[in-house]
Amino acid sequence: MPAPNPVRRLLRSCGGWVRSRLPGRRTWKTDLLAGIPGAIASVPDGMASGVLAGVSPIHGLYAGMAGRVFGGLQTSTKLMVITTTGASALAAGSAVATVPEADRPAALVMMTLVVGVIMIVAAVLRLGRYTHFVSHSVMTGFLTGVAVNILLGQLTDLTGASADGAVALTEAVDLALHLGTVDVPSLLIGLTAAAILVALGRLRRLALVSALLALIVTTTLVAVLGLDSVAVVSDVGSIPAGFVVPGVPDITLLTPSLVGGAASVAVLILVQGAGVAEATPNPDRSRSDVDTDFTAQGVGNVAAAAFSGMPVGGSLGQTAVNVAAGARTRWASVFSGIWVLVILVACSSLVARVPMPTLAAVLVVAAVGSLHPAQIASVWRSGTTARIALVVTFVATLLLPVTAAIGIGVIVSLLLQLNREALDLRVVRLRVEGDRLVEVPAPARLRDHEVLILDVYGSLFYAGARTLQTHLPDPADAVAPMVVLRLRGRSTFGATFFTVVREYAARLDENGGHLYLSGIAPMARAFWNDERLAAQGVALDTFTATATVGESTLAAYADARVRVARDESPDEEM
């Protein structure tokens, strides 16, 4: 039978992918309607994200549209909404803060493209599993710091005041010392918007449109009352009329610092996206794939850059709105993005008149809502290590650029992981009772002519291997002690582990003893063959694991007993 035509096979595969992405006949009407609340909520959120990044709010709207449409078609978490988030906007703004103001919007767009490329590369390399290395305590500290940063950073726009400061905290302190710069009409508009958001947010039927109603009411008040001192969106940047035309970012703005900032933003977005996937199971019970979601968010960012947008990622809040609106498939997000585009084309002149204090109020209320005292208290009660991670990340987020705080958070997470691996390691003794192995505490010292089986719980990489060294029974003064180290279930070993093994085997040999390794996986033994072990200075007996649990360990134990009997026999003959 002739082999299938490669071109035909490719076309068939592409056709299957396209069919899987088409809206369902039974669900498209539901998803079309479900996309409307998300689009309405997206308008104030997108505009606020642009403000948070230090650019025109229009960039947030463009990003929200492109992320929902192009990213939504790729996700494995089918109800995930890819749009702007407060944390990513703050991080992106921090990354381009040193760029001259005139070039900042174009630099942000270029960085968005780099973020998308980094995400797609991460997906190709299947790096999704590494998102789990960022600890809960670190993320809690970081997101709490982001919320406080947003709250403090928006006080100037909320009050119409001017203040100086290297970070949001020092800017808020400067504002408190110069309250005379507060513009009363701006403050009243901001407080009115905040009151509407809080009041309507408690009503289930109006919660989804509370931000839009706040925009409409306050925009009307500013226009009717002629409050010229209140800053509006058009004061920050022009709002183009009509449909945005895709383009290519300005590559001349690409710098090493921009790439570094993009990497930090990408890490943050990917970790947040993984959290969205965990919190939003698929309606058809299919499993989400982290790397596929990486690709989707990468595609969303590339599209956002093409439409002059800013970084986007999986949004827990917007995904919750999508689910609450009755979304059935990924097309609810896609339709939501199309509705955003309709709003942009039809209402661009109205968007330009939105008061800046209103957008500040949207961010402040959202920041307060994202503070979770119970979660912070839970982390605090988890122990000293969790407290240190929480406080270090929180303080770093407040006092340093967000991109630097992300790097510190990643480093703290890795250190916590290594520390946990070291602390969790435990060595126990397996006592042979007939054909069974019974677990008992390991002794601190070895005895003469003793055959001891040891089992190890925990990681044997890096610090774990060195911790094992301190947990192994001391062979000092023991005559001909035999130790069987059981390693079943471990597929790989590091050089540090074999350094520890070599040193312990040498100590046993000095006393006429011997070290055995049992339960080694065949794949690991094939890699660590005699030649490679010899290069590490290791020469000992190894017993490869079999399908029968304990068989290789008992074989090593029997060999050790024979060796002990052989060593003792000359004394008996004398």
Image (cartoon, rainbow, N blue to C red):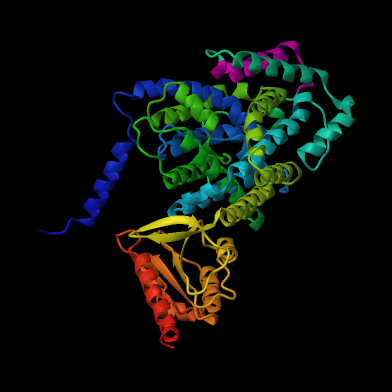
Instruction: Report if residue 216 lies within the magenta region.
Output: yes
SS assignment for the magenta stretch, majority: helix
Q: Is residue 140 visible?
A: yes
Question: From what the image shows, is residue 132 above or below residue 434?
Answer: above
Q: Which residues are magenta?
A: 207-230
Q: Quadrant of the C terminus?
A: bottom left
Q: Report the side of 318 relative to 522 (left or right).
A: right
Instruction: Report if residue 116 lies within the magenta region.
Output: no
Return the x and y of residue 507 as percentages of the image width and height.
56, 77
In front of the other: 311 or 287: 287
Q: Quadrant of the N terminus?
A: bottom left
Q: Residue at x 89, y 31 (%)?
A: 177
Q: Report the side of 312 relative to 288 (left or right).
A: right
Total marks drawn? 0
In front of the other: 539 or 228: 539
Return the x and y of residue 185 as percentages of the image width and height.
79, 17
Q: Residue at x 46, y 34 (%)?
A: 80
In front of the other: 276 or 412: 412
Return the x and y of residue 299 as percentages of the image width and height.
46, 44
Q: Residue at x 52, y 60 (%)?
A: 442
